Image (cartoon, rainbow, N blue to C red):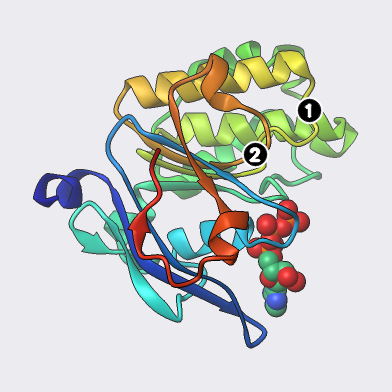
């Protein structure tokens, strides 16, 4: 436990309330370096809300989230420099080109990735020939790929990814699996909402089912399988 507190993500007795309604409670799990936690559940079960709690964008009505040895606080520079969050929107600008988007987000993130590294990741995502194109001219799936490039290039140890495979074709999904496996192999932690079985081809994923939680709000157990 002490080691986990220093190195990984620790969630205890988490309760989430939105618009006066308790979405879930008693949620707890640990994620050590190299762990991937797959979050499943029906629409509205609270998957996105959970990710927002984990990165400190939402405050829990009960419980705690710790990254390494500290309580999660987005104002903490140490935590802000450790987490990469991919929301539904992907955080890319339609007005900027593909490469400009990456340069901008990496500059804001304080990452030292150079254009050459950006190009390497874009090649893997089959966006290598689109680097000078305005993002608004890309398809939804291509924009999602660019959002993933931003996450990969950030080199952050904690990935919180909300439906990263939405809009991706099979090849894009496989590419995502390989980035996720690289991340886990290098000791990163990832919490991923997706209905795909990412544990089958990618890294071994622990599964967290929000539907079960909603029906068992008093649970205070470790949901890793
Ligand atoms: N900003 C908000 N204010 C109030 N309620 C919200 C807000 N955002 C989400 N909710 C409510 O919280 C519940 C869970 O939403 P959330 O987006 O976390 O679910 P989800 O499991 O990610 O859903 P989906 O699979 O549809 O993306 C929903 O009932 C939703 O109406």
Quadrant of the rendering where the C terminus is positioned: top left
How packed mark 1 is, by other alpha carbons closer than 10 Å (few <14, some 14-19, many 20 or more), is: many
56 up-or-down from 204: above or below = below
Disc 1 is placed on an element classified as helix
Residue 79 at x, y percent in the picture: 32, 56
- Residue appearing at x 62%, y 27% in the figure: 197
Residue 1 at x, y percent in the picture: 14, 50
Does the rendering let one see residue 132? yes
Q: Quadrant of ligand 1?
A: bottom right
The answer to whether residue 215 is left or right of residue 1 is right
Question: Closer to the N terminus: mark 1 or mark 2?
Answer: 1
Does the rendering let one see residue 134? no
Q: Which mark is residue 194?
A: 2
Residue 203 at x, y percent in the picture: 45, 21
- Residue appearing at x 28%, y 34% in the figure: 33
The answer to whether residue 75 is left or right of residue 136 is left
Foreground tag (1 vs 2): 2
CA separation in Å, label 1 and label 2: 18 Å
- Residue appearing at x 20%, y 44% in the figure: 7
* Residue 44, picture quadrant: bottom right
Q: Which mark is residue 142?
A: 1
């Amino acid at each position: 436990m002490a080691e986990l507190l220093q190195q990984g993500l620790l969630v205890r007795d988490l309760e989430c309330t939105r618009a006066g309604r308790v979405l879930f409670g008693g949620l707890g799990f640990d994620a050590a370096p190299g762990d991937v936690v797959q979050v499943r559940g029906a629409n509205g079960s609270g998957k996105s809300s959970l990710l927002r709690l984990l990165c400190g964008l939402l405050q829990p009505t009960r419980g705690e989230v710790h990254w390494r040895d500290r309580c999660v606080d987005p104002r903490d520079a140490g935590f802000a420099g450790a987490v990469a969050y991919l929301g539904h929107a992907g955080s890319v600008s339609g007005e900027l080109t593909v490469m400009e988007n990456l340069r901008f987000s990496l500059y804001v993130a304080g990452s030292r990735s150079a254009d050459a590294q950006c190009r390497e990741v874009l090649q893997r995502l089959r966006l290598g020939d689109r680097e000078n194109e305005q993002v608004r001219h890309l398809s939804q799936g291509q924009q999602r790929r660019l959002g993933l490039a931003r996450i990969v290039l950030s080199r952050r140890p904690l990935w919180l990814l909300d439906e990263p495979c939405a809009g991706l074709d099979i090849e894009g999904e496989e590419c995502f699996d390989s980035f996720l496996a690289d991340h886990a192999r290098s000791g990163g932690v990832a919490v991923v909402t997706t209905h795909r079985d990412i544990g089958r081809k990618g890294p071994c994923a622990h599964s967290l089912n929000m539907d079960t939680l909603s029906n068992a709000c008093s649970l205070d157990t470790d949901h890793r399988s």
